[in-house]
Image (cartoon, rainbow, N blue to C red):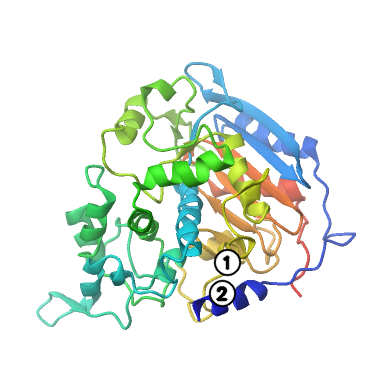
Amino acid sequence: MIGRLFAALAAGMLALSAPAAGEDAFALDPARIDRTLDGFVEKGRVIGGEVLIWQDGAERYYHTAGLADREAARPFSRDTLVQLYSMTKPVTGVALMQQWEAGKFGLDDPLAWYIPAFANVQVADGTNPDGTPHLRPPSRPIVIRDLLRHTAGLTYGGGDTYAEKVWGELQPLAREHTLEQFAELLAQVPLRYDPGTHWHYSAAIDVQARLVEIFSGQKFDEYVRDHIFLPLGMKDSGWKRGRDDLPRLAAIYEGERGSVLTRRSDEQWLDRNYSGHPMTEGGAGIVSTIDDYMRFARMLLGDGEVDGARILKPATVKIIMTDQLDPKITERLWLPSKGAVGYGVNGAVRIAQPQTEREDRGTVGEYIWDGASSVLFWVDPVNDLAVVFMTQRMPNDITLHHDLRAAVYGAEYLGPVAD
């Protein structure tokens, strides 16, 4: 039944007309993209960055501007290592979908079948008359599909609800925990919502990483190395990095928009990424280069294959890049700020043309995600296009993404209409 359901879903993806002449068509304008990236640096919006574009089976554009390390006067280059933060998430989704292809689980299987601690999870639903939190069983179990589309009701911590209070006490993602310990602790954190009712960004991707370990019998980072990075030729990508990377690593620069950006210390990087920490997050932590990550983007653009190396079936890639959110899920946190998008597997999917002038330019059917350090990538099957933007500026400045996409497509681009 699951196979039939998802075959139908894949076959029922949005049918898109090819770009026509006029406002729906675009041609890359390298000079325009150069000006935009150079302007980011000149105006102090980033210290440095780079853009790589692949289209129609070949590299069409590369440009770098500014510095990877201002204090060392080291420029951004194709050899620069960058911290991906949440651009790790699509990689984790691919790893789990490989296990789905292998028949290790069904997308509608209850999570508790594989991590029994989740059989007893509770929903935090207001307060009792005596002021204590009211906890109740969820209206239905969390299923694995919920983890893939952020509808499990889980949290990431950092808020003021009772669920986030318990998260703060237990610290499931603390670096001294293994993914197995993380999952056991997370199951003790109440859900914010009933599964399937809200889109809420959460540690669901880290649960995916634990499931990869359970299904494959390998540590998560070793699995990804063996089944994604090595087959795709992503020789510079991985977790658990250290001091040897510093000569190539782009520094993180921090500051609010319009302020002078200050450098985060190398010691913060080394402490976070110390190889002795057991935790390997599914939602963050990969260090990569622009060329490596483009190989991952090209794999999605190529229906699961790059240069003869196939790691996913085309139908599985279609599932990843298809909106998985039911229309009844109207509460979607900040997802609508990314524009007319739904959500596929660990990434946003454009479901309609840009609705306002302020919205990012893009094409219906594209798959998009970014990271806390303002990194960004997207895959646009209609235009046979993949774009990777690397920088290291925190907090994530989505105005950079808006301006870059306007430079790539043109400020008036709307793309073809969904049939």
Task: Pick the residue in front: 352 or 321.
Answer: 321
- Say whether disc 1 or disc 2 marks the residue closer to the N-terminus: 2
Tell me residue 62's x, y (percent). Answer: 70, 33
Q: What amino acid is found at the position of numbered circle 2 in the picture?
A: Phe
Tell me residue 235's x, y (percent). Answer: 53, 33
**Residue beneath the point at 56% across and 61% down:** 348
Label 1 – label 2 distance at C-alpha: 7 Å
Compared across the picture, whether 23 is left or right of 110 comes to right
Task: Pick the residue in front: 415 or 14.
Answer: 14
Say whether residue 62 is visible. yes
Residue furthest to the left in view is 130
Q: Label 2 crowding class (10 Å Cα cut-off): few <14, some 14-19, many 20+?
A: some
Which residue carries the number 2 mark?
A: 6
Q: Is residue 317 above or below residue 232?
A: below
Q: Label 1 crowding class (10 Å Cα cut-off): few <14, some 14-19, many 20+?
A: some
Instruction: Find residue 304 and report its image quarter.
Output: bottom right
**Residue beneath the point at 56% across and 24% down:** 67
**Residue beneath the point at 24% across and 65% down:** 163
Q: Are marks 1 and 2 in contact (CB under 8 Å)?
A: yes
Tell me residue 33's x, y (percent). Answer: 73, 39
Task: Pick the residue in front: 260 or 307.
Answer: 307
Q: What amino acid is found at the position of numbered circle 1 in the picture?
A: Ile
Compared across the picture, whether 409 is left or right of 206 comes to right
Name the disc covering residue 400, or none.
Answer: none
Q: How many marks?
A: 2
Compared across the picture, whether 385 is left or right of 183 comes to right
Residue furthest to the right in view is 21
Instruction: Identify the element where label 2 is drawn.
Output: helix
Which residue carries the number 1 mark?
A: 319
Tell me residue 411's x, y (percent). Answer: 75, 52
Quadrant in which the C terminus is drawn: bottom right
Q: Is residue 139 above or below residue 407?
A: below
